[in-house]
Amino acid sequence: MTTPATLTRLEKVAADNGFDLPGPHEGDWLHFSSTQVPLNVWLMALGDNLYLAAFSQKNVSLALDDLGSPMVSPMPKGAVGLRSVPSIPALHHLSSCRGPYPPRSSMPTKPARPTCPSLPRSSGSWCSE
């Protein structure tokens, strides 16, 4: 059974990574969705050294190929990809990598600069990367 402290840490992992809408639990799986990306994530702890993250989109799970280990154990309903990691910090990192969905709330670190030198500035067109 997952301890209350571990449940709180799993909820924090989800919230810290933009999964701000808790969904219905499915067994020991905690379900979260996001107002920022069209993705659902389910988190589970199995003891103190095995943490699971399931994703609702296969492309996201495949994009995380170098993080964690793929799993094929039973997934929650709606999940199509599953990865395991050995710690909460690793789970935090795994959950922050949302494949093709960058965080919408992040602000650029510098102003956009035009990258289309063939367009004159007087045209009012700004091409950003």
Image (cartoon, rainbow, N blue to C red):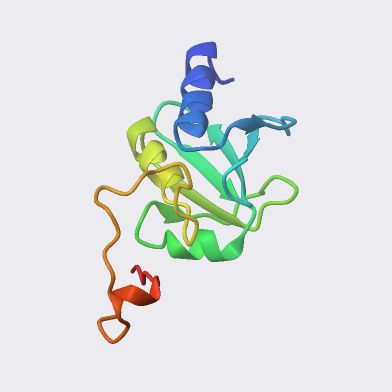
Where does residue 78 sit, x and y in percent of width and height? Answer: 73, 51
Q: Residue, x 52% and y 59% (percent of image)?
A: 61
Please determine whether, in this image, residue 107 is positioned above or below residue 60.
above
Where does residue 90 sit, x and y in percent of width and height? Answer: 35, 40
The answer to which image quadrant residue 65 occupies is: bottom left
The extreme top residue here reads: 4
Please determine whether, in this image, residue 98 is positioned above or below residue 9.
below
Q: Residue, x 35% and y 60% (percent of image)?
A: 66
Nearer to us in this view, 63 or 17: 17
Give the quarter of the figure containing the N terminus.
top right
Q: Residue, x 37% and y 69% (percent of image)?
A: 126
Q: Please give left or right for residue 15 compared with residue 38 in the image.
A: left
Q: Residue, x 48% and y 62% (percent of image)?
A: 100
Please determine whether, in this image, residue 53 is positioned above or below residue 116.
above
Q: Is residue 29 among what the camera can see?
A: no
Q: Please give left or right for residue 63 compared with residue 7 in the image.
A: left
Q: Is residue 9 among what the camera can see?
A: yes
Nearer to us in this view, 43 or 115: 115
Give the quarter of the figure containing the C terminus.
bottom left
